[in-house]
Amino acid sequence: MNYRCVHRWSFSEWGGSLALREEPLEPPSGREVTLRVTHCGMCHSDLHIQAGGFDMGGGKLSSLERAGTRLPVTMGHEIGGEVVEVGPEVTGVAPGDRVIVYPWLGCGDCEVCARGDEQLCSKVARNLGIQLPGGYADMVRVPHERYLVPIGDLDPARAATFACAGITAWGAIRKLSPVTSDDWIAVVGCGGVGMTAVALLSATSPAKIAAIDPDPAKREAALANGATAAFDPGAPDALRTIGKACGHAIAGALDFVGGESSSAMAANLVRRSGEVVIVGLFGGEFRLPVPMFPLKSLTVRGSYVAGLHDLRELVALAHRVELPKVPLDLRPLDSVNQALADLAAGRVVGRVVLQP
């Protein structure tokens, strides 16, 4: 393979389709690493990235361009592959190593980055798949070897999804207080990340799991991946039905939609002293009567992916524990535009994983 050029699927205007581009690739320097991409998961947030921003409610849209993202953009932040070239200062990996990539890169020097939360760095964002070229390509350049996590004998297609779906679900779960077998946890939205949360909860938590999604196929898949019960949020009197079925014992709700109706449902479902973690980026405004907070002793917090240490921890967990296998939809990389259309239309159950 010629490592001096890279073939990327990129969009050159906000909202535009992706097209194949060939670009030069200089040899890696310092502690940089060149990876041959074997698998790249597709995330729902890619739809927002392609559109150029997120719905902030009230008719307002955030702007990736104003925040510093420059066209063309090569998306793809769930990257798995094989090391093919390393910079002269690299010592921790070698050509042939199978790895996944932590894509949420901060400045690397501030206090936030030092504690392992580069995804929350307020100084600079240089995320692979947004500000830096991502994994919708045959190769990707990783700025530092520390962002590579060896996967050993794990399924590389499944391991690639750990870099976003996996650690996003894991990070949200870890924000909940300890629960018992008498408690329920509601998972609102059973797309790729929500389905991963169901699987991880079933493998690591004693609580019963209520999977909530309007799609019958996703509810069925959630039950197959460890959910105790599944509910349609659009059914008549859904709040009352779900609350009664769960014995009004929902201790925590994880909202993987992040829309106005989903966050309101999550807040109304949890019991007194319950916790809501909002993860999804669908958009809109969070609206809730202020007296509910003190009357229910309600806690509402956000969760944005997770740190590099969480990715390493999740890979270690996957080696120790047999995790339920979230459905994977393997597709060739050149079908990326159709895959994005299917994702936008809600036709994906589980996670699409692209293969160059």
Image (tube, rainbow, N blue to C red):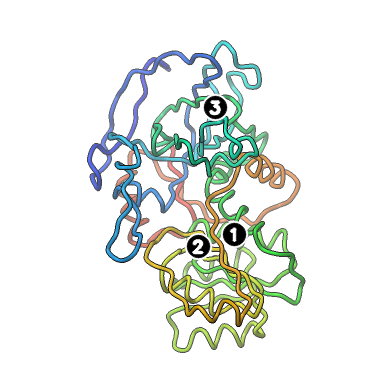
Could you say whether the residue bearing mark 3 is in a helix, strand or loop? strand
Residue 241: x %, y % from top left:
55, 87
Q: Quadrant of the C terminus?
A: top left
Query: Which amino acid lies under the numbered mark 1 shown in the image of this protein?
Result: Ala
Crowd band around label 2 with a 10 angstrom C-alpha radius: few (<14), some (14–19), many (20+):
many
Q: Which residue is mark 3?
A: 82
Instruction: Determine whether label 3 and label 2 are within 8 Å by CB.
Output: no
Q: Nearer the viewer, mark 3 or mark 2?
A: 2
Q: Is residue 166 above or below residue 74?
A: below
Residue under label 1, please give it.
197
Residue 24 rendering spot, x and y as whole percentages: 33, 18
In the structure shown, which secondary structural element does the residue marked by tag 1 occupy? helix
Does 172 sit above or below residue 8? below
Task: Left or right? Give the position of 108 relative to 179.
Answer: left
Which mark sits nearer the N-terminus, 2 or 1? 1
Q: Nearer the viewer, residue 3 or 178?
A: 178
Query: What is the CA distance from the residue labelled 1 to the residue labelled 3?
Result: 27 Å
Which quarter of the rendered picture does the N terminus lie within?
top left
Which of the two marks, 1 or 3, is nearer to us in this view? 1
Identified at 41% across, 38% down, the residue is 129
Q: Nearer the viewer, mark 2 or mark 1?
A: 2
Residue 256 tag number: 2
Q: Earlier in the sequence, mark 3 or mark 2?
A: 3
The answer to whether mark 2 and mark 1 are in CB contact below 8 A is: yes
Q: Is residue 121 left or right of residue 90?
A: left
Residue 9 in the figure: left or right of residue 252: left
- From the viewer's perspective, is residue 290 above or below residue 179? below
